[in-house]
């Protein structure tokens, strides 16, 4: 006996809408809410309706065109190029909007350069995601976007600005405490520990350092933590700072590095011959940190899941632009990498 052919009425009943609504979706005739259209598509696919691919195509045609702008840091860094690729992919998977991605890179930590890029992006994008320092110039640029009704999301490092639409990234304080917990269990209680910080203008870096010091007080109260060295989130400066620290402190047992520029620190550890006896904990997975884990230069990497950041950012922007919420998201789970679980 031949299977019964699925009809518009069947799809409508499954989706909980009227036949006229299914017809409007199928023939791309407005008005149909995004929610109703999504239910029609889900029902058509579940029932095996013969035109379900056409329905998906029609829904994509009905989706509004939006430009998602992303302002990232230095293009030369593998981490930001990988994030850009993930953002492109996540935006392409959106169904509620037809997203075009505009990505730019800011090559310095100048707040004025960041503010100028936000102002430029304000003219070309419908929503913005930005990796930024905390600074009044940047706050004024975000406030101007908010005044225009344009959502701006902080990526990777939070911002305290009142006009911000939300933050997408990990809980940096917890990540810092995790680094401190790990360090305390792998060095003597009275060990001398160095700390490298990219920039205290990054609230994420500030929270990482704070969490690390907090955990070390709890788990290794006798440890001797050095004053933090700020390296402006630059690999060359990080190399010089780490090499100077290693030469000046022959008893240094551990080094916690919050921020970018890991290539510089890995190089300093290897050149100084200390890569086997200084326990080095850093952030973000990439070719340099993976190599460091394999040869023992790096003990632990606390990694931000770039695909999850991209998906959360694209989803939050779509929600904000289509009136279905948006705003702050739950912190993303970070990952712990060792030589054993690469």
Image (cartoon, rainbow, N blue to C red):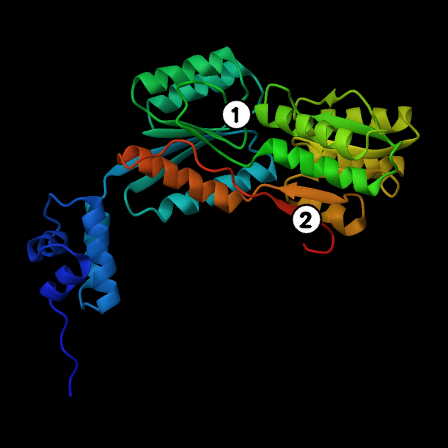
Of all residues, the one furthest to the bottom in this rendering is 1
Residue 316 visible in image: yes
Residue 180, image x, y percentages: 73, 35
- Residue at image x 24%, y 49%? 60
Is 175 on the left or on the right of 276, as rendered? Answer: left
Q: Nearer the viewer, residue 223 or 313?
A: 223
User: How far apart are the alpha carbons under marks 1 and 2?
Assistant: 29 Å
Dot 2 alpha-carbon crowd within 10 angstroms: few under 14, some 14 to 19, many 20 or more: many
Q: Nearer the viewer, residue 148 or 87?
A: 148
Give the residue number, with chain letter if any, for mark 2: 337
Of all residues, the one furthest to the front in this rendering is 218
- Name the quarter where the C terminus is drawn: bottom right
Contact between labelled residues 2 and 1, with CB atoms less than 8 Å apart: no
Of all residues, the one furthest to the right in this rendering is 250
Dividing the picture into quarters, in which one does residue 22 lie? Answer: bottom left
Q: Nearer the viewer, residue 213 or 323?
A: 213
- Residue at image x 39%, y 40%? 314
Residue 27, image x, y percentages: 11, 54
- Name the quarter where the N terminus is drawn: bottom left
Find numbered disc 2 in the image and state the secondary structure of the residue it sits on.
Answer: strand
> Of label 1 and label 2, which has the lower sequence position?
1
Find numbered disc 1 in the image and state the secondary structure of the residue it sits on.
Answer: loop
Dot 1 alpha-carbon crowd within 10 angstroms: few under 14, some 14 to 19, many 20 or more: some
Q: Is residue 59 above or below residue 79?
A: below
Residue 34, image x, y percentages: 21, 45
Is 274 on the left or on the right of 148, as rendered? Answer: right
Give the residue number, with chain letter if any, for mark 1: 106
Q: Is residue 20 above or below residue 197?
A: below
Residue 102, image x, y percentages: 39, 34
């Amino acid at each position: 006996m031949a299977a019964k052919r699925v009809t518009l009425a069947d799809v409508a009943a499954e989706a909980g809408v009227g036949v006229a609504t299914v017809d409007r979706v199928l023939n791309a005739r407005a008005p149909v809410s995004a929610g109703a259209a999504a239910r029609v598509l889900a029902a058509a696919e579940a029932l095996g309706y013969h035109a379900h691919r056409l329905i998906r195509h029609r829904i994509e045609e009905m989706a509004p065109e939006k430009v998602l702008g992303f302002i990232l840091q230095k293009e030369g860094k593998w981490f930001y190029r990988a994030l850009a690729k993930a953002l492109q992919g996540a935006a392409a998977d959106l169904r509620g909007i037809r997203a075009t991605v505009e990505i730019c890179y800011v090559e310095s930590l100048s707040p004025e350069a960041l503010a100028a890029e936000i102002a430029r992006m304000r003219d070309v994008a419908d929503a913005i995601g930005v990796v930024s320092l905390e600074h009044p110039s940047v706050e004024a640029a975000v406030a101007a976007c908010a005044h225009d009704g344009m959502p701006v999301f902080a990526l990777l490092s939070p911002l305290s600005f009142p006009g911000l639409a939300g933050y997408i990234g990990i809980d940096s304080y917890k990540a810092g405490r995790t680094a401190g917990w790990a360090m305390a269990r792998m060095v003597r209680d009275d060990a001398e520990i160095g700390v490298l910080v990219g920039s205290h203008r990054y609230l994420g870096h500030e929270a990482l350092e704070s969490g690390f010091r907090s955990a070390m007080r709890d788990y290794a109260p006798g440890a001797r933590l050095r004053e933090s060295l700020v390296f402006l989130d630059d690999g060359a400066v990080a190399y010089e700072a780490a090499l100077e620290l290693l030469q000046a402190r022959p008893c240094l047992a551990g080094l916690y590095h919050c921020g970018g520029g890991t290539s510089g620190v890995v190089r300093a550890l290897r050149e100084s011959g200390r890569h086997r006896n200084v326990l080095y904990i850093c952030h973000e997975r990439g070719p340099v940190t993976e190599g460091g884990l394999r040869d023992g230069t790096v003990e632990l990497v606390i990694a931000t899941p770039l695909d999850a950041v991209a998906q959360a950012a694209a989803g939050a922007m779509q929600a904000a632009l289509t009136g279905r919420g948006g705003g702050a998201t739950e912190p993303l789970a970070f990952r712990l990498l060792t030589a054993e679980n690469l």
